[in-house]
Image (cartoon, rainbow, N blue to C red):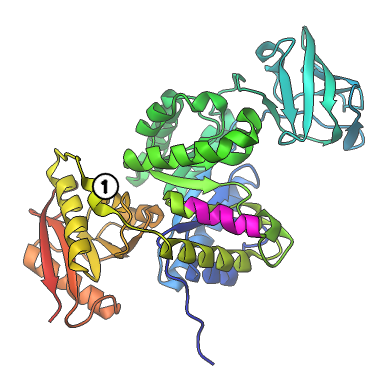
């Protein structure tokens, strides 16, 4: 029986690890079907759970022959209601309901406590609070001490620890909590490649998170990439400064949609993807992408369109959350997403000439990267190869749509893993070699061994001289395989 062909696509898939997918054999299959980044959700589980799962990811990657990145996703502030005596209540429209920060006993249909004790200081009469992802809407009528008095506008079932958002934003909860700081230490103990920060409001939040990560990882000589999850209304006007302080962003459509309204999210998604690419940052599109596959073996047509549109917008990665963490069909979901990515990319129309029109590049290494793209595109090259230490050259090239596979060869394992998130970049590990000509011959031999190029194929290759200096790419060579 022949082995089914695996889709080849440039867009990366981020899969969340959880009870449904924490098996070595299953994870190995998911990686074989093009999962490039594995997300560990620190909102659930113990520190040891995450340490054990990270070790499983590394082992599954080793067995698959493909390195993947690990992304530690911090929980952020718990902006939630407390618990109910019966576990849940039903709120009727027009009923009065009190959120009391000082209440310690379980709640009832009239009142409930708060995990977020600062809520009474963040709201005033006339504000609207959205609970449980906006399914319940409360209108604030008064704030009396620690008690927020409301009228139920949109009712329904409210259960323990459901989230609270303020319409239009404005909650003052800090992006980093004491738990997050402890989780950063855990994530750095296994050298997570990326750290995703929940609810950042500005660049300062990201700078603080980076500093904490770098300190915690210093003993390992490691520096993770920082991903800002854009899920607060306040983050939108500060998007450019947040991008500058980060290595990438996540379009976290759940909480963001609750704060700014569902209708605003599609245009914001396109804006965020465009800005990230223009600023040479990576971007992940997330939340409910294949939500129905938590319980169903096939996606809805709307979900197919949603994933495809994110790919056509130019996202680096599309993310699966509960679909792979707790769903019934984690592998099937990855397989379906792979097919959608491949089909969407086949419909793309690369316009590199237009991309470069009027652009000026002051850095030599960036000019070389753009030259490699332009030349390979017009020559119909089989591949673009970058010998890289920092990963900067492949990152720059990946910001442009090109239907030419890019292979990034590096001697640094940490760089290889980090590049697993870059669109259309296939990172490979190669022994370091200080002599340029030897390194170029080794690179071609590496590509031939993997069946990437064969006799007669043309490919473009970039490197730096002297070899091994991060940010030192200064050479472009066009080669024909003999």
**Quadrant of the rendering where the C terminus is positioned:** bottom left
Would you say 204 lies left or right of 149 here? left
Q: Is residue 110 above or below residue 479?
A: above
Q: Which residue lies most toward the bottom here?
A: 1
For the stretch drawn in magenta, what is the main secondary structure? helix
User: Residue at the spot x=32%, y=45% of the render?
Assistant: 221
Within 10 Å of disc 1 (Cα), the crowding (few <14, some 14-19, many 20+) is: few
Q: Is residue 419 left or right of residue 153?
A: left
Q: Nearer the viewer, residue 404 or 210?
A: 404
Total labels drawn = 1
Residue 204, by quadrant, is top left
Percent from the top left, x then y, of residue 27?
56, 66
Q: Is residue 303 magenta?
A: yes
What residue is rendered at 17% in x and 63% in y? 461
**90, 155: nearer the viewer:** 155
Q: Which residues are magenta?
A: 301-310
Badge 1 element: helix
Residue 15 appears anywhere in the view: no
Q: Position of residue 166 (x, y in %)?
A: 67, 23
Residue 250, image x, y percentages: 49, 42
Indicate whether residue 362 is drawn in magenta.
no
- Residue underneath mark 1: 355
> To which quarter of the image does residue 300 belong?
bottom right
């Amino acid at each position: 029986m022949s082995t089914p062909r695996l889709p080849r696509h440039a867009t990366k898939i981020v899969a969340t690890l959880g009870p449904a997918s924490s098996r070595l054999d299953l994870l190995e299959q998911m990686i074989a079907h093009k999962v490039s980044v594995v997300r560990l959700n620190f909102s659930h589980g113990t520190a040891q759970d995450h340490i054990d799962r990270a070790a499983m990811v590394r082992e599954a990657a080793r067995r698959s022959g493909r390195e993947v990145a690990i992304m530690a996703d911090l929980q952020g502030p718990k902006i939630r209601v407390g618990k109910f005596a019966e576990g849940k209540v039903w709120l009727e429209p027009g009923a009065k309901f009190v959120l009391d920060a000082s209440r310690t006993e379980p709640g009832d249909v009239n009142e409930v406590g708060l995990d977020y004790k600062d809520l009474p200081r963040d709201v005033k009469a006339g504000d609207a609070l959205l609970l449980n992802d906006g399914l319940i809407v409360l209108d604030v009528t008064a704030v009396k001490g620690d008690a927020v008095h409301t009228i139920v506008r949109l009712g329904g079932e409210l259960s323990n620890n459901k989230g609270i958002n303020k319409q239009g934003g404005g909650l003052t909860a800090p992006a980093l909590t004491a738990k997050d700081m402890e989780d950063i230490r855990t994530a750095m103990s296994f050298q997570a490649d990326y750290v995703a920060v929940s609810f950042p409001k500005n660049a300062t939040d990201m700078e603080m998170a980076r500093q904490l990560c770098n300190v915690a990882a210093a003993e390992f000589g490691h520096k993770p990439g920082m991903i800002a999850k854009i899920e607060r209304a306040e983050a939108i006007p500060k998007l450019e400064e947040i991008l500058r302080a980060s290595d990438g962003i996540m379009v976290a459509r759940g909480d963001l949609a609750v704060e700014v309204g569902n209708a605003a999210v599609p245009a914001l998604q396109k804006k965020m993807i465009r800005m990230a690419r223009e600023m040479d940052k990576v971007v992940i599109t997330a939340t409910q992408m294949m939500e129905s596959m938590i319980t169903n073996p096939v996606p809805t047509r709307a979900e197919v369109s949603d994933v495809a549109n994110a790919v056509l917008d130019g996202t680096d990665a599309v993310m699966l959350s509960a679909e792979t963490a707790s769903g019934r069909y984690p592998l099937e979901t990855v397989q379906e997403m792979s097919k959608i990515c491949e089909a969407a990319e086949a419909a793309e129309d690369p316009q590199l000439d237009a991309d470069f029109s009027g652009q000026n590049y002051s850095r030599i290494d960036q000019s070389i990267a753009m030259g490699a793209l332009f030349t390979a595109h017009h020559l119909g090259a089989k591949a673009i190869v970058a010998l890289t230490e920092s990963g900067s050259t492949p990152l720059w090239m990946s910001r442009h749509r090109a239907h030419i596979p890019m292979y990034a060869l590096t001697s640094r394992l940490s760089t290889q893993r980090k590049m697993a998130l870059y669109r259309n970049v296939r990172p490979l590990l190669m022994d370091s070699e200080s002599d340029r000509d030897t390194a170029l011959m080794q690179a071609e031999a590496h590509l031939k061994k993997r069946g990437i190029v064969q006799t007669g194929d043309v490919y473009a290759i970039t490197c730096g001289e002297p070899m091994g200096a991060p940010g030192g790419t200064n050479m472009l060579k066009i080669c024909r395989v003999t």
